[in-house]
Image: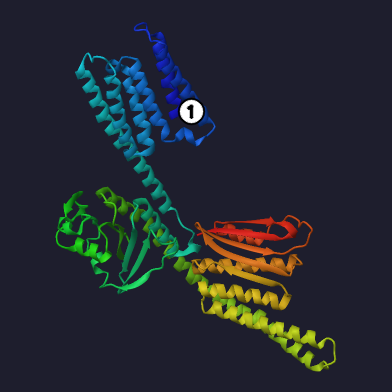
Amino acid sequence: MVTHIRLLLAVSALLTIFTESAPEPDHLDWAVFIGYTLHTTALFVLSLLHKPIARSKLIHWLDACWYTMMVVSTGGSQSLFFLFFFFAILTASFRWGFEEGARVTVASTLLFFAACGLEKTVDVPSILLLRATFLLALGYMISRWGQSELTSRRRLALLRDVSRLSNPRFGVDHTVTSVMRKTLEFFSADSCVLVVRTEDKVECQYRAVKGDTPAEITRAQQVDAQAMAPLLNFARDQAVVYCSPTSPRAAFLADWRVYDSASNQWIKGAGDEGHSVAEMLNSRTFIAAPVPLRHGEGRIYALSGKRDFRKADALFLGHIAAQAFPVIENIELLDRIASEAASQERKKIAYDLHDAVIQPYIGLKIALHAMSRKAKPDNPLAEDLQKISDMAAQVIQDLRRYAGGFSDTVVLGESVFLASLHRQAEQVRKFYGIDITVSVDDEIAISDRLAAEVYHVVSEGLANIRKHTSARRGAIWVSCAEGWLKIRIENEGDETHPADFTPRSISHRAAALGGRARVLTANGGRTAVHIEIPV
């Protein structure tokens, strides 16, 4: 749209000069207007080709230079083409914000003065002063409007992101951390702190996300409620903004304001509550907003030692909390309901495993043991019978551990998850002679439910290697980077090119987690299944 309007302005200016009877422009004037038309035509073509230079900051500065030459060639202070400066101010403000718009406004005013200064005599100095003042004042207002538009877009985008229902499989910790991380990035804060106290507990949940730490899941810390009391002393419906001078010597000039929702006004904070919170959080400035909870109270803080927060920031922080935390409470409720239902189902499955699976295996083990005792030591089947008997004993042990995990409602934690992968690889090597290498990123941080899902995906991948390939070596890589949990299951191959296939079970599990799975082949017939799951 901007390139269309720019081209329209250039053509209209050229037509104006062409149809104007007096004064007749000389060849240099024609060159200016024709040159600007060619310039805008080139930008129009570049925008159709989606070239990034058509949207760069350089363009509106070039526009201001062209408009200066137009003013010089058409009468200086008397030229009507000074209005074109507003187009450069508009594009800078609504695309890049207040600072860039203000710079273009000041530069346009100075360029207008410089263009008029090239005149030998200024016929009406008052017109020059009036136009320059008009350009400066209206340009400042346009810059403010542009910044307001950009801020509104960013706020709407943030509210849209935090209100999206997160996958309950990832858990509450993942969702809360994501909201806090987005809040921290939006306000360009140093850290974000969340304190929650429920009605039926004497302890508070404390979470902190810092901008200089890796993007990982933040677990809630149980802290004594009395120690966290200063952070919850504000009224439940009050937003707070605190600001103190940069110099410690001027700390007495620190000021904090509280938003009174009843009167819709900001009032000066009374007492030392704001100062005590700032000292407790070790922050020069902060904003705080209440967290709406059904059964309890909470407050979220954004802290910074560099920038000064505004009152509008504190109010918008309250909007973020009001938009995100009802969704988080619903996820927590859904997680609790699912956990209770799964607990009952696990107990039922544990009984079924014991009666329908483990008992027959025990009978098989007893029969194999009896057959191995009947076989003489020189019997060629004795070693195989003993191996099958040991394998049955191992399967019984695994089934009992599996059934015990179901009945005890145990889920996989990070350390258990890693140990389970190594144990699975060891069993594949022992029973099937396939050497599996397991590599897990040290910085991986996933919830228990997601760890259980990943374990099933890896188990299915190892089963595919065993059933559908003749490989004797394989590898498993698990890493987490840029918000994605990446799993790669690879096996060696022969020189023949393997047939194209899609692991249906793995693909379905990855899709259920909002991820994707794909199969890649490499030289030597090696095959790798890549699974990516958003975290």
Kind of element beneath mark 1? helix
Q: Is residue 457 visible?
A: no
In the depicted structure, whether residue 309 falls above or below residue 449: above
Write down the quadrant of residue 197 in the picture: bottom left
In the depicted structure, whether residue 387 falls above or below residue 140: below
Q: Where is residue 377 shown, x and y percent of the image?
A: 82, 93
Q: Nearest the camera: 110 or 245?
A: 110
- Three-letter amino acid code at the position of disc 1: Leu
Q: Where is residue 5 shown, x and y percent of the image?
A: 42, 25
In the depicted structure, whether residue 223 falls above or below residue 108: below
Q: At x 27% / y 48%, what residue is drawn?
A: 312
Q: Where is residue 363 shown, x and y percent of the image?
A: 71, 86
Q: At x 48% / y 62%, what residue is drawn?
A: 168
Write down the quadrant of residue 347 in the picture: bottom right
Q: At x 31% / y 14%, what residue is drawn?
A: 75
Q: Nearest the camera: 221 or 134?
A: 134
Q: Is residue 260 left or right of residue 475?
A: left
Task: Farthest residue to the top: give it.
Answer: 21
In the depicted structure, whether residue 27 falls above or below residue 374: above
Q: Is residue 463 visible?
A: yes
Q: Nearest the camera: 144 or 330?
A: 144
How many C-alpha atoms fall within 10 Å of the one at disc 1: few (<14), some, or many (≥20)? many
Residue at image mark 1: 43
Q: Is residue 28 left or right of residue 234?
A: right
Q: Is residue 348 left or right of residue 157?
A: right
Q: At x 23% / y 20%, what residue is drawn?
A: 128
Q: Where is residue 404 shown, x and y percent of the image?
A: 56, 81
Q: Nearest the camera: 435 or 208?
A: 435
